[in-house]
Image: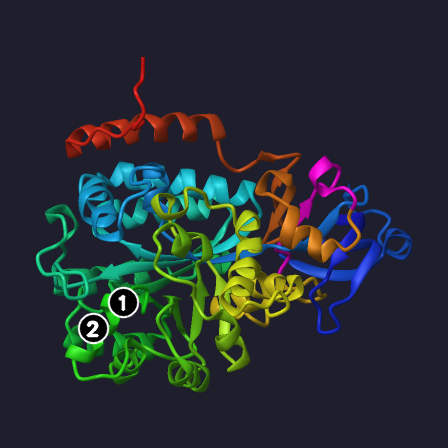
């Protein structure tokens, strides 16, 4: 196929922006990038897609996702973190069936595709959500994913004991064994689009000895690890009780850091931690909307980037963000960094786009395959329709994407060389059926949980 007459944000080493540019794909790969006139002449028989001057760029890579939480978005608004988690989120999730887990994943993936996300990392897929059902949705939807299967053996959160809803508690041996079984069944499925990782719970939810075992297994099999770390102050207290200066040092002692690890949040970290993360090649997923909503703090993005840490971007989950629209969240990365440092120049639009594409590709373990529009790379890209009032004028397409665009502006999504969405119609999923089922199941889950969720204002 040939996608022509686009303004292309290549994200190549020279960071070139091509006006009236074209991208040619063959199978799952990009085979040519250049000016439309030249490539249309070189490839006259290709199926043509006229981008009409819109922005074509690498697909967004969301490095921190809870697919099960799409179906409970808005369930715990304006609550403190412990009430948010202990009285709403875990209570609802603890009443999920496997079909609920599949339906929520479908809703989440549908939303991600429609807002320009082409790859994502799931951090905590619990046993009760049904791994096979979720994996099937990934395969059939066309999206690219790394699914972190949950591993845990303690029903606690940081220093808070006995805090977890009974429906969320899993046995350590079972969760470890079933993660390896899922890896054997699904890793590398769908032309390599699906990967299976370890997704252990936060320190305090896993014994140090189990961390040691899973990190050894991950190294032996080349599996990724993704884990929440230093998200809240309580994480610092837990690490110090264990005899470590910080959660980062605790994680290093138990083999959890390295080039195959993505840490979510890292809000409560310092320069010593950043040095360790950079030296070990550990990746960080920054979650600006989630951290803001839960008042967890503002992550030190500038400090980490300057120290050489690979910082990426994640939307997190429906209750902590209410949306999986990465384009909407891009501006928050820059805004929060400016606010924290009292300097509007520290994380500019160019850096934000690199975090969402190139940096995400490295965290995904595919830095040589994804993240830019270059010949030889996988054909994962999106087209943003710029013919809208809120995108006019567009002096600089990088700024337009980072600061003005929304997920609803995405017109076309290509993943692994397949057109997954065109003209805002997802071609691989039944949008109406997915939305209807998720809405129905959400109500059923709330009823099983014994929760009434609705407006705080009177309804007449």
Please determine whether, in this image, residue 246 is positioned above or below residue 415. below
**Region rendered in magenta:** 378-393
Disc 2/disc 1 C-alpha distance (Å): 7 Å
Q: Residue furthest front?
A: 342
- Residue position marked by numbered label 1 in the rendering: 233
- Residue position marked by numbered label 2 in the rendering: 237
| Residue 14 shows in the view | yes
Image-quadrant location for residue 16: bottom right
Q: Is residue 347 left or right of residue 253?
A: right
| Residue 427 is inside the magenta segment | no
| Foreground pick, 332 / 98 | 332
Q: Sort mark 1 into few (<14), some (14-19) or many (20+) by Cα contacts within 10 Å.
A: some
Q: Are marks 2 and 1 in contact (CB under 8 Å)?
A: yes
Q: Position of residue 144 (x, y in %)?
A: 49, 54
Q: Position of residue 371 (x, y in %)?
A: 61, 64
Q: Sort mark 2 into few (<14), some (14-19) or many (20+) by Cα contacts within 10 Å.
A: some
| Residue 370 shows in the view | no
Q: Is residue 321 left or right of residue 429?
A: left
């Amino acid at each position: 196929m040939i996608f022509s007459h686009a303004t292309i944000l290549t994200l190549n080493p020279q960071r070139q922006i091509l006006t009236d540019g074209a991208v040619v794909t063959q199978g799952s790969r990009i085979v040519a990038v250049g000016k439309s006139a030249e490539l249309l002449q070189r490839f006259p028989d290709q199926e043509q897609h006229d981008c009409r001057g819109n922005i074509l760029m690498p697909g967004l890579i969301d490095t921190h996702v809870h697919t099960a939480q799409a179906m409970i978005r808005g369930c715990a608004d304006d609550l403190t973190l412990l009430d948010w988690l202990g009285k709403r989120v875990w209570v609802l999730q603890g009443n999920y069936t496997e079909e609920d887990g599949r339906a929520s994943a479908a809703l989440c993936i549908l939303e991600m595709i429609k807002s320009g996300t082409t790859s994502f990392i799931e951090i905590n897929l619990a046993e009760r959500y049904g791994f096979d059902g979720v994996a099937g949705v990934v395969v059939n939807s066309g999206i690219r994913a790394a699914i972190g299967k949950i591993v845990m053996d303690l029903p606690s959160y940081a220093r808070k004991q006995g805090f977890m809803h009974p429906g969320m508690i899993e046995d350590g041996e079972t969760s470890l064994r079933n993660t390896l079984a899922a890896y054997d069944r699904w890793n590398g499925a769908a032309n390599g689009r699906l990967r299976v990782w370890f997704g252990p719970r936060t320190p305090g939810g896993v014994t140090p000895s189990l961390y040691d075992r899973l990190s050894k297994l991950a190294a032996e099999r080349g599996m990724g690890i993704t884990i929440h770390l230093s998200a809240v102050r309580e994480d610092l207290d837990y690490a110090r009780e264990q005899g470590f200066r910080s959660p980062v040092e605790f994680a290093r002692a138990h083999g959890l850091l390295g080039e195959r690890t993505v840490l979510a949040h890292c809000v409560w970290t310092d320069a010593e931690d950043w040095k360790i993360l950079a030296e070990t090649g550990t990746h960080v997923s920054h979650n600006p909307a989630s951290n803001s909503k839960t008042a967890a703090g503002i992550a030190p993005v500038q400090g980490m980037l300057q120290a050489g840490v690979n910082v990426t971007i994640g939307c997190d989950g429906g209750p902590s963000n209410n949306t999986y629209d990465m384009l909407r969240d891009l501006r928050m990365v820059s805004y929060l960094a400016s606010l924290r440092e009292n300097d509007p120049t520290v994380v500019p639009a160019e850096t934000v786009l690199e975090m969402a594409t190139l940096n995400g590709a490295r965290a995904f373990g595919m830095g040589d395959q994804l993240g830019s529009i270059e010949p030889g790379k996988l054909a994962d890209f999106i087209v943003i329709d710029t013919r809208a009032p809120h995108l006019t004028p567009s002096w600089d397409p990088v700024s337009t994407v980072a600061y003005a665009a929304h997920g609803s502006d995405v017109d076309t999504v290509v993943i692994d060389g397949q057109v997954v969405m065109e003209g805002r119609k997802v071609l691989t999923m039944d949008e109406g059926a997915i939305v209807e089922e998720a809405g129905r199941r959400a109500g059923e889950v709330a009823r099983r949980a014994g929760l009434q969720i609705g407006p705080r204002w009177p309804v007449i």
